[in-house]
């Protein structure tokens, strides 16, 4: 039997209040409109390409999300760009917004604990993103049914469902980062700019820096270079450093799910250029992507714990 004033009661109050605010806010409507508009345009062109150029393909619905040879017009790449923006837009003012509105002391004066407040806000933001992504996922599948005229196979549905879960986990890590910054910075503008700046750094600059640092830590062997092959130690360092970026982890997990022909983990753009070998079964693809999935979830938990500890140490004055 649940006791009066337990943290779970406070959690439900915060969660449903924040969820309602997110779903009815103009900010969320604008962000979701951008995702639907850009994603819909990309999927339309992908469907037209499949109808015109694809003959016998057992993974037609997977090509909607990641058409081979069209990496710059990929629905996956659109999500990899817009999902972090959506997550940061929902979380950058989660805590500091309450301070700026001078409502933090009023909220905590109620039978609501700090951990329930922080987790309720994070869970509401993640639920909002999940609702938007599930809706978009169903719209794309429905559009594929209309344009392609064939239903997806069971394996395709399984792969697309895992892809959806990975995308939600990818959104979770950026949401946790934004919420953590909202704890550290009292200014909402500063929290948003720092979060967006870190995302741009990890998405645009870090892959090149990882290649350079890997070469410095473990220089290439000239014997491998003469054969046109990468040095194993250098490649291991470069891949390990590049996986610091959530975008790299997300890209590698998506490669395994949406490209059954991929036999190894490399970058998103390289693997979607064409088929490599025979298609892998779903369970083998999940095993390939499992470390990346776990890393995304672990990163989300780590960032949330950092924000949680910092929030618990902050002083709340009336």
Image (spheres, grey):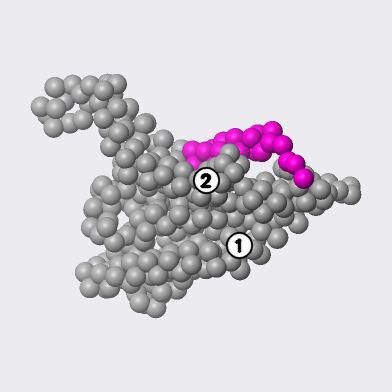
* The disc label shown at residue 22, or none: 1
Q: Is residue 219 above or below residue 242?
A: above
Front residue (pair 142, 276): 142
Q: How many marks?
A: 2
- Whole-percent x, y for residue 156 in the image: 42, 60
- Whole-percent x, y for residue 52 in the image: 22, 73
Secondary structure, magenta segment, majority class: helix
Label 1, label 2: how far apart the Cα atoms are: 18 Å
Q: Does 86 lie within the magenta span?
A: no
* The disc label shown at residue 191, or none: 2
Q: Is 215 situated left or right of 2 in this image?
A: left
Q: Is residue 95 above or below residue 145?
A: above
Residues under numbered marks 1 and 2 in contact, where contact means CB atoms less than 8 Å apart: no
- Whole-percent x, y for residue 180 in the image: 57, 42
Quadrant of the rendering where the C terminus is positioned: top right
Bin the neighbour count of mark 2 within 10 Å (Cα to Cα): few under 14, some 14-19, many 20 and up.
many
Residue drawn at x 46%, y 38% is: 291
Bin the neighbour count of mark 1 within 10 Å (Cα to Cα): few under 14, some 14-19, many 20 and up.
some
- Whole-percent x, y for residue 285 in the image: 41, 46
Q: Which residues are magenta?
A: 294-318
């Amino acid at each position: 039997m649940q006791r009066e004033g337990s943290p779970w009661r406070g959690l439900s109050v915060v969660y449903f209040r924040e969820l309602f605010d997110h779903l009815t806010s103009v900010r969320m409507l604008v962000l979701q409109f951008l995702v639907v508009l850009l994603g819909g345009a990309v999927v339309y062109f992908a469907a037209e390409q499949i109808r015109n150029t694809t003959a016998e393909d057992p993974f037609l619905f997977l090509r909607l999300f990641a058409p081979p040879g069209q990496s710059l017009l990929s629905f996956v790449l659109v999500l990899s760009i817009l999902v972090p923006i959506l997550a940061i837009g929902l979380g950058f003012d989660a805590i500091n917004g309450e301070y700026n509105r001078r409502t933090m002391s009023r909220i905590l004066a109620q039978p609501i604990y700090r951990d329930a407040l922080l987790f309720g806000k994070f869970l509401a933001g993640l639920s909002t993103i999940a609702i938007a992504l599930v809706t978009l996922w169903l719209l794309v599948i429905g559009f594929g049914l209309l344009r392609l005229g064939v239903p997806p196979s069971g394996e395709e549905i399984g792969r697309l469902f895992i892809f959806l879960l990975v995308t939600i986990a990818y959104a979770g890590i950026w949401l946790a980062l934004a919420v953590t910054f909202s704890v550290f910075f009292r200014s909402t503008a500063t929290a948003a700019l720092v979060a967006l700046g870190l995302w741009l750094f990890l998405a645009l600059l870090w892959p090149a820096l990882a290649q350079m640092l890997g070469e410095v830590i473990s220089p290439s062997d000239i014997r491998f270079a003469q054969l046109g092959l990468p040095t194993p130690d250098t490649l291991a360092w470069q891949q390990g450093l590049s996986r610091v970026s959530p975008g790299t982890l997300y890209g590698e997990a998506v490669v395994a799910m949406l490209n059954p022909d991929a036999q190894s983990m490399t970058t998103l753009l390289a693997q979607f250029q064409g088929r490599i070998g025979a298609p892998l079964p779903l369970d083998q693809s999940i095993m390939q992507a499992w470390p990346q999935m776990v890393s995304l979830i672990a990163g989300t938990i780590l960032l949330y714990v950092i924000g949680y500890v910092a929030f618990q140490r902050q002083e709340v004055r009336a």
